[in-house]
């Protein structure tokens, strides 16, 4: 059972930092037994049908029709609720089997509908689909509440959780029971009637405030456009000029050039424009979004959001929102997350001073009589980059062929996971678009079938941007072994027939990253579907780690080969790539950490009522010694991750938390006798970091892998920062 897929949650915020989502969902199981309530319509609606065909049954992507979606969702929800009614109607006392395990099998038909829903939402969206989405959103939200507020159900779950039987369960079963219990308790199931009402009122008000917050940011992004004439384009590359011309034309300003108030416009403009006054104007406008003391100002909304969140967790007995949020995260407490960030902070701001000194010297050399301001940072950093780390991205591209990179990923999976990837026979597995290809995954030694891997590599209309991984079916074995149907999705531009598709270094890393999510799903060995669920500050770690294999000698020599000559990437070019990796790290780490620290501090306040967010941000940063040349990556009044929903509230720290693990785990390989392909370390990687998913507390799992807790030293080395002991 999954309560609600993440693409429907209020937490749906685009994440620009990593640009990736792991949509691995706890379960999607096939069912061969129809319930008694099965109606005629259920039997004929293809979206609800058990999956048939080879490989334990596969989604009928060839039978997807939008016309069936609304009815399928409604029937699926009804059946899901009926399944739950059967559990609560059981006259026997609640037990692990008749309640917790029974819940795992609930709503299988709806899970199948959500697989198709996910494809329509991410891979082939349309106006017609979005209309259905709008119509169904409130119904799905109501459905979700019906489950979390089902008192009879929660009573049974709580009875198991507090029962003597709990002690006799396996540790995996205990963890499952605890996670299910907390999933309900943390969302208000323990409250009395009056409290429940207040809880629901708060959530309703918060939902309104989240929408308002993001609409205000959007209004400021759309409302401010800087129009330039041909004399004001100094320094801008052709591609940017063309995009700006098109943006102006589409706004009825033919012949002008529009710089819009978004990151994708602001960032390159500040990097390349030689017009300092215009850079200042673009910078000011962008970092003032939601903070202009007008009808789109977000400060009052933030104060109200923080107060309501604090009141809501107060009903559950927590001192502050961050404490509530982090209890089931790997960090466990806000203080531990804060300690980590504060131990990196001094090195980050010290590096900013070095970067500023470099830029200042370069500006002087060029005869620019200025002192570096925030709107100068990207511009002079780019000059420094050219002088110090010149890396020709076009030259790198010649060695990055999409097909070869996929072979490289398969090679790595073979060496680390003992997986073999074989293309399925053409036409044997239905796909939703002809570009989608499918491979069967087996164990290299035993030939045992593990699952399928679907790849949808190319951009097209109706497909969301970025790259992501998702699973159509997760592994479980409590009710017979279920194989895994995993997928990777990206937006590469299709080349001419017969020509190699060449991609950038960043894209190659992302390709490996998403494949890491797929391997995490494919290697799962959990008993119960719920235990496939992700832990926010942990679930990006496995995928980040896999990126490290891109630069191993085995991959470079066999797969990073020139598309024309077939020669491996030369050592000098590899060295340049490694060298450039720490460039501008002071700026990047500082702008990120400033946002993450403010997010956490705002949610650690015991009484946020009446807070002035602007003043809080200013005073806190000043006390931390924030360099005047850098601004938060997301200033508070525009911090959508945190205030457009709850997905990243008190959770933005998670990126760095996962990166500490990534660097530390990568060093375990680097220092092993067999390096990144060391058999012993690889076996531990699969056993403790991948296959357990959420069946084991992440902290314990990591300790089992490494023999100790993660340390920050490896991250500091990766970023080129001095170690804490050397500072
Ligand atoms: Zn990811």
Image (cartoon, helix red, strand yellow):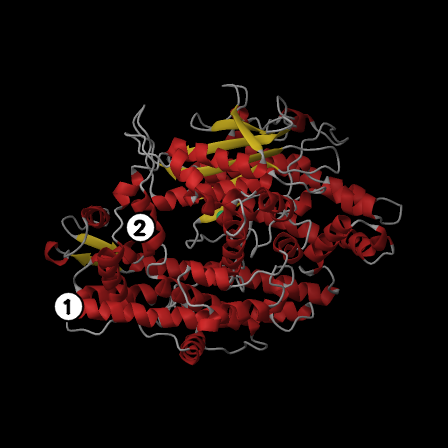
Q: Residue 603 in the image: x percent, y percent?
A: 55, 70
Query: What's the residue at 40%, 79% (across, down)?
Result: 622
In this rendering, is residue 294 above or below 255? below
Q: Is residue 25 visible?
A: no
Q: Nearer the viewer, residue 209 or 706?
A: 706
Total marks shown come to 2
- Expressed as whole percent of the image width and height from the top left, the position of residue 579 reads 34, 54
Query: Disc 2 marks which residue?
Result: 576
Return the x and y of residue 631 as percentages of the image width and height.
Answer: 35, 69
Whether 164 is drawn above or below 338: the answer is above
Q: Nearer the viewer, residue 321 or 520?
A: 520
Task: Judge: label 1 CB < 8 Å from ligand 1.
Answer: no
Q: Which mark is residue 403?
A: none
Residue situated in front as seen by the camera: 223 or 519:
519
Left or right of 179 in this view: 70: left
Residue drawn at the location 41% of the way across and 53% of the way down: 16
Q: Residues within 10 Å of mark 2 (few under 14, many from 20)?
A: some
Q: Nearer the viewer, residue 321 or 454?
A: 454
Inter-mark Cα distance, 2 to 1: 25 Å
Q: Secondary structure at mark 1?
A: helix
| Quadrant of the rendering where the N terminus is positioned | top right
Quadrant position of the C terminus in the picture:
bottom left
In the displayed structure image, the side of residue 504 where residue 649 appears, left or right: right
Farthest left residue in view: 231
Is 528 situated above or below 9? Answer: above
Tell me which label, 2 or 1, sits earlier in the chain. 1
Task: Estimate the x, y position of residue 45 in percent, counting from the top left.
Answer: 61, 27
Label 1 sits on residue: 365
Q: Secondary structure at mark 2?
A: helix
Q: Nearer the viewer, mark 2 or mark 1?
A: 2
């Amino acid at each position: 059972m999954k309560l609600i897929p993440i693409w429907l949650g209020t937490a749906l915020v685009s994440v620009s930092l990593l640009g990736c989502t792991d949509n691995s969902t706890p379960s999607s199981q096939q069912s061969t037994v129809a319930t008694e309530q099965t109606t005629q319509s259920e039997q004929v609606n293809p979206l609800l049908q058990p999956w048939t065909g080879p490989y334990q049954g596969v989604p009928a992507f060839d039978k997807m029709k939008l016309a069936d979606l609304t009815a399928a969702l409604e029937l699926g929800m009804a059946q899901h609720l009926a399944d739950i009614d059967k559990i609560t109607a059981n006259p026997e006392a609640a037990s692990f089997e008749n309640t917790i395990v029974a819940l795992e099998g609930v709503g299988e038909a709806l899970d199948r509908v959500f697989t198709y829903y996910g494809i329509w939402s991410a891979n082939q969206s349309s106006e017609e689909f979005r209309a259905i989405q709008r119509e169904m959103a409130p119904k799905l939200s109501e459905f979700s509440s019906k489950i979390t507020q089902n008192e009879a159900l929660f009573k049974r779950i709580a009875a198991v959780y507090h029962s003597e039987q709990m002690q006799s369960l396996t540790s995996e079963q205990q963890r499952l029971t605890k996670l299910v219990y907390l999933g309900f308790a943390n969302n208000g199931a323990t409250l009395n009637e009056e409290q429940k009402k207040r809880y629901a009122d708060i959530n309703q008000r918060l939902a309104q405030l989240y929408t308002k917050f993001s609409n205000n940011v959007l209004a400021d992004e759309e409302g401010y456009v800087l129009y330039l004439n041909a004399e004001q384009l100094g320094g801008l590359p052709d591609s940017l000029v063309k995009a700006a011309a098109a943006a102006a034309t589409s706004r009825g300003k033919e012949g002008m050039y529009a710089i819009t108030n978004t990151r994708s416009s602001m960032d390159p403009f500040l990097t390349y424009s030689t017009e300092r006054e215009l850079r200042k104007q673009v910078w000011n406008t962008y970092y003032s979004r939601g903070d202009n003391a007008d009808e789109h100002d977000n400060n009052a909304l933030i104060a109200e959001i923080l107060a309501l969140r604090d009141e809501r967790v107060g009903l559950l007995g927590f001192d502050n929102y961050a404490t509530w949020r982090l209890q089931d995260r790997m960090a466990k407490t806000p203080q531990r997350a804060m300690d980590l960030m504060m131990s990196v902070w001094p090195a980050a701001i010290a590096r900013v001073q070095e970067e500023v000194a470099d830029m200042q010297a370069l500006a002087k050399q060029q005869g620019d009589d200025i002192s570096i301001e925030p709107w100068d940072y990207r511009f002079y950093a780019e000059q420094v980059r050219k002088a110090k780390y010149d890396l020709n991205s076009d030259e790198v591209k010649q060695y990055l062929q999409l097909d070869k990179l996929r072979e490289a990923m398969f090679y790595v999976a073979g060496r680390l996971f003992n997986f073999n990837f074989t293309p399925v026979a053409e036409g044997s597995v239905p796909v939703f678009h002809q570009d989608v290809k499918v491979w069967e995954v087996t164990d290299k030694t035993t030939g045992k079938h593990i699952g399928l891997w679907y790849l949808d590599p190319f951009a097209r209309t109706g497909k969301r941007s970025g790259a992501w991984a998702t699973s159509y079916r997760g592994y479980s074995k409590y009710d017979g072994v279920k194989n895994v149907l995993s997928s990777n999705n990206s937006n590469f531009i299709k080349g001419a027939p017969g020509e190699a598709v060449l991609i950038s270094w960043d894209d190659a890393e992302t390709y490996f990253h998403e494949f890491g999510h797929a391997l995490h799903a494919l290697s799962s060995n959990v008993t119960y579907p719920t235990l496939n669920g992700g832990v926010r500050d942990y679930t990006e770690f496995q995928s980040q780690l896999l990126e490290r294999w891109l630069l191993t000698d085995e991959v470079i020599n066999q797969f990073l080969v020139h598309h024309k000559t077939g020669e491996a990437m030369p050592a000098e070019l590899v060295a340049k790539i490694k060298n450039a990796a720490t460039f501008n790290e002071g700026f990047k780490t500082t702008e990120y950490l400033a946002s993450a620290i403010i997010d956490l501090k705002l949610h650690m306040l015991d009484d946020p009522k009446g807070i002035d967010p602007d003043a809080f941000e200013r005073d806190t940063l000043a006390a931390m010694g924030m360099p005047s040349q850098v601004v938060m990556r997301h200033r508070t009044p525009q911090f959508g991750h945190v205030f457009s929903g709850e997905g990243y509230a008190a959770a933005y720290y998670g990126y760095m938390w996962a990166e500490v693990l990534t660097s530390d785990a990568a060093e375990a390989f680097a220092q092993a006798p067999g390096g990144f392909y060391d058999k012993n370390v690889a076996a531990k990687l699969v056993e403790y970091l991948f296959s357990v998913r959420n069946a084991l507390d992440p902290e314990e799992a990591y300790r089992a892998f490494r023999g100790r807790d993660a340390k920050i030293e490896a991250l500091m080395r990766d970023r080129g920062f001095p170690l804490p002991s050397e500072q």
